[in-house]
Image (cartoon, rainbow, N blue to C red):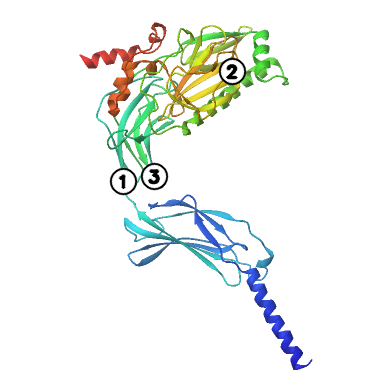
Amino acid sequence: MSAKRIAIAAAALVVLIVAVLLLASSTPSVSLDPSVKIVGTLTPMSVNVVSRHGIRRLDVYIEQNGARVEAGRLTWPSSRVWFWLHKRAPAQYALKAGSKTAPGIKDGPATLIIEATANDLRGSTATLRRPVTIATGPPMVSADGEQHYINQGGSEVVRIDPSGYWTEAGVRVGKYTFRSFPMPNGTGRFAIYAYPWDLPPDVVPTAFARNPTGAEATASFAYKLFPKPPRKRDFDLTDDVMRRLVEQIAPGGSGDLLSRFLAINRDMRRENNATLAALRDKTQPRFLFTKPFRQQPDSKVESVFADVRSYMYHGKKVDEEVHLGFDLSITQHVPVLAANDGIVVFAERLGIYGNCVVVDHGYGIQSIYGHLSEIAVKPGDAVKQGQAMGRSGSTGLALGDHIHFSMQVDGVEVNPVEWWDGHWLQDHVWSRLGVAGAQSSNASAATAGAGAGPAAKHRRRRRR
């Protein structure tokens, strides 16, 4: 082979090698989602990496006062020969870093550095730098020094003051957690919480503050609970009743009639209640109302909050469920009125509730309207107290035309009677938060006897 041909072949080989290197190599990109602003003892991080051939290594450093300390590392076997044959999709990596993985760092400002090294011949590196605050001290929390009176199944407000490094603060009552919000006026935070109907009377409400490292602080506050035993009632099932209910909710199903009914009454009820509870995330961080809630005018109370219903079939108990609301009847297809000002967050069919509307009133307070024959609002609509949102009916698990009305606080169903009472609202909400609100009471004689007694007695006692 001539020297000229050898030179051409060598040049072609060099071009080929350069082309392969250029095609096979790529600089990765790295990002944090969500962003990290505070690093504690062991803060979780989610790192997104885009690299054509994957990465060999992911390094985390914390830089402070001119010194860089390694805080974490993930490594993978490299494949330097056949790497260009493997195309990698964007990936997300979870790791934890903080004072436990980077000894010597101190509380204060620092820089978080994340480096991703590509799995290619060049070992291309991408670096992400983010200013952070090192905060390794535990959270702290205190609660107000007031006496709190609460009915079982009722609601209450407590002011709390979390400090230190915290990301979540509120009130815990047994298995239930209630968020806190900034005070409408002034400093600190507050939580509207419930003492749920299904908890024993020895559960102690506790204020808490915690952060992602698992550190938590708690504080107690003075409270007095008024237990309220649920009302128990039998509900007689017949084949005709079950057939009517089953066919209007889940027509055309298979299986025996009783099994189909129990699946609706048990499983669908729990699924529907979980859907309603999840609406707690669709709330405004402000009060959308200034007046007491209003019961549907001229309505008759057929069932009250936390009725325990034993379902009897041929003299045998086949199920037991709790009715978490009020059944209000008037006549057929009456306008269903908003109990207070708010924003519609749900308006569609929902299993046992039939056509259902949910209105958010701010700070996790929401009202629920079920069994409607028609719906006249949509999510996002602002409604005023007394505004028609549809008409009553018997859709869902209902035998006759009525309105299922209930309320929930941060996803937990509560007794609406208190929210209908302007005096209770003033004593337990407005005065504690230092905001003005109308005090007129709309509670009817029928509902006033359904659960407001203990709170009213203690209101009078406090005023003496």
Q: Is residue 135 above or below residue 400?
A: below
Query: Which badge, 3 or 1, comes first in the chain's sequence?
Result: 1
Residue in the foreground of this view, choosing between 160 and 204: 160
Asked where in the image residue 255 lies, by quadrant, the reply is top right
Residue positioned 52% across, 13% down in the render: 335
Q: Provide the residue designation for mark 1.
A: 164
Q: Is residue 320 above or below residue 379?
A: above
Asked where in the image residue 70 lies, by quadrant, the reply is bottom left
The residues tagged by marks 3 and 1 sit, at their Cα atoms, a distance apart of 10 Å
The residues tagged by marks 2 and 3 sit, at their Cα atoms, a distance apart of 45 Å
Secondary structure category for the residue under label 2? strand
Quarter of the rendering occupied by the C terminus: top left
Q: Disc 2, disc 3: CB below 8 Å?
A: no
Whether residue 224 appears in this view of the structure is no
Residue positioned 35% across, 31% down in the render: 191
Query: Which badge, 2 or 1, comes first in the chain's sequence?
Result: 1
Quarter of the rendering occupied by the N terminus: bottom right
Q: Provide the residue designation for mark 2.
A: 374
Check disc 1 and give the amino acid type.
Gly
**Residue 132 image position (x, y, % from top left):** 38, 55
Residue 59 is left or right of residue 226, and the answer is right
**Residue 157 image position (x, y, % from top left):** 33, 27
Q: Is residue 433 above or below residue 37?
A: above
Q: Provide the residue designation for mark 3.
A: 211
